[in-house]
Image (cartoon, rainbow, N blue to C red):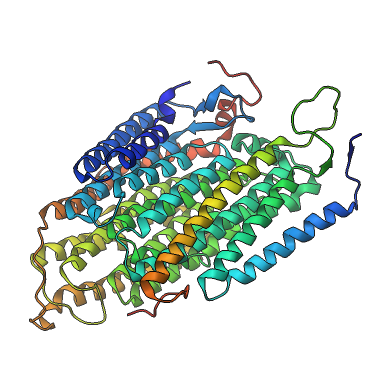
Amino acid sequence: MTRPCRKGDTVEALIALAVGLMTAAGIYLMLRQRTFPVILGLALLSYAVNLFIFASGRLLRNAPPILTPGVTAYSDPLTQALVLTAIVISFAMTALIVIMALGAWLETGDDRIDMDPDP
Amino acid sequence: MNHWIIAPVILPAVLAPLIVLLMRNHLGPQRAVGLAGTAALLCVAVGLMILAGKGDPQVYHLGGWPAPFGIVLVLDRLAALMLVLTAALALIVQVYATVTGWDKRGQHFHALFLFQQMGLNGAFLTGDAFNLFVFFEVLLIASYGLMIHAGGRQRLRAGVQYVAFNLLGSTLFLFALATVYSVTGTLNMADLGVKVAALPEGDFALIRVAAVLLLLVFAIKGALVPLHFWLPATYANAPAPVAALFAVMTKVGLYATLRFGTLVFPPQTPATGSMPGDLLLPAGLITLIVGAAGVLGAGTFSRLSAFAAIASMGTAFVAVSIFTVPATAAALYYVIHSTLAIAALFLVCDLVSRQRDGDSLRHALPPMARGGMIAALYLVTAIAVAGLPPLSGFLGKLMILQAGRDSAALIWTVILVTSLVVIVGLSRAGSVMFWKAHEASADNRPRAVSEWPAVACVTVLLLLLAALSVFGQPVLEYTTATAAQLYDTAPYIAANALGEQVAP
């Protein structure tokens, strides 16, 4: 039995809250001085945006994304494909910035994110 | 379908992995394949420009999937112009990196260089908003590698900042695209143009939020104030040839703004109206002021060049923000000019700092071998960057002033005053670098390096600038036709054949 989410369904509120909280935490961490919290912040932001893209295809319960006999309500397959792409890219980027931060830490001896003052 | 349209993406996508897999320890073949690849890209780009000049936009349906469900590449005059500009600049810069030995100071220079071009070309060609995001990421990943090429303390730290800032930009881009998709249900740019124009009034607020988010993303790429903070540290610390190539990377932000501002959110669309232009004009003017102040106050030559790049982006965005055919034609002319001029400035900066320890403008450094030659190159480049006659910067700024007549009090004042400030800044830098060299202690002798091939590369760039002013009329005719094509969106949308089956 499929039915679209009713307005005011708790799932919508929970997803909106999750996106908002993760974005807020991500931005807070992005503004820190050291590379480690900044990378954590970036990771949180990418989780938030993945959830947001998923929700932009509308939230439906028990609705398949591909053609199935006898089904009339479908969920949007495109947003799910977009989320997959976004996950792959953000995962690769996080790996890359971890390596770069590690390189900078080994090279400079500390993990401050900001530059030395102008010579 | 004309399969050549996808060649600027496929060619580097095939050659770069070949370089990584087969010749990772052999610099000679790497150089040969890398340079041959870029030269081939230039030939393809020129061919596509001739094709695009024949008339309406041409569409390549990837995999034969009909738009708006499949991804499309669209070749029009603007895309072709940017392809040629990218390939020409890339070839000169790559030759410079080869003759100066920059490419052997780290690994995979030529492969990354080709990947960077793949991302740039893809971003210029794509007709799908999400695909634009993907190509942004491709060019960014390659630019991260190029940025920290040759390593070093300051460079790595600047690299981490650059990556973090751009990851934030990518996240913002995804938020913007998801908002656009939730309102319109499509991400094909031609389809977006149709859907946004026909939106019911209840969706206006949401699409405006999406439009502002997209503008913010493009402003990050184009280094508009207040989102320019990544640029000075990145450009000043990147290897000089890479910084010269990055001169075209900021133009991607401008290109995307222009594309979305004319196709998806044109001034006559009721949902957004004149909002993009209203936001871009003050941002462009402030960017110009910040850039000019930076040129005047920079402590090193490389930072001066970075701020000159910011100032040129400000000028170009001011012209874009007017959103009329003559203004856009002027903006495109200025984009060609400023890309070549800023690249030349970074290469001259490299010529200077190669012979000296550092490029400080705070105190005099020892004289250089063939200093007169380099000083002459600097003089011509500075004339181009500041926009003095007879080089093309003057023509470009003149056309922008002419297009901005309607709000002359504001636009003219800012552009003219900042031009003066830039001239003062560049003169001061030149005096310290070249005239005060005799004041420096003689025990710090310059390193002897072979200069001629490097000087030749810079000269080619400057000759291109001279050609741009000599052939100003034909170039302006092309950019005017480009601008006219941008504002007449019907052929672009028709070319996408939305919802129709694709003939194989």
- Comparing B8 with A100, the one in front is A100
Instruction: State whether residue B239 is above or below residue B327.
Output: below
Residue B400: x and y in percent read 42, 54
The answer to whether one can see residue B232 in this image is: no
Side of A102 where B356 appears, left or right: left
Side of B435 where B155 appears, left or right: right
Residue A31: x and y in percent read 58, 72
The answer to whether one can see residue B270 in this image is: yes
- Comparing A75 with B388, the one in front is A75
Instruction: State whether residue B293 is above or below residue B98.
Output: below
Give the residue at x 55% y 48%: A89
Residue B326: x and y in percent read 46, 46
**Quarter of image, res B366:** bottom left
- Comparing B107 with B74, the one in front is B107
Q: Looking at this rendering, what residue extends furthest in the top direction? A: B503
Question: How many marks do you count on the picture?
Answer: 0
Residue B274: x and y in percent read 63, 52
Side of B15 where B220 appears, left or right: right
Instruction: State whether residue B448 is above or below residue B274.
Output: below
Give the residue at x 25% y 37%: B33
Instruction: State whether residue B425 is above or below residue B254.
Output: below
Give the residue at x 26% y 77%: B361
Give the residue at x 40% y 74%: B293
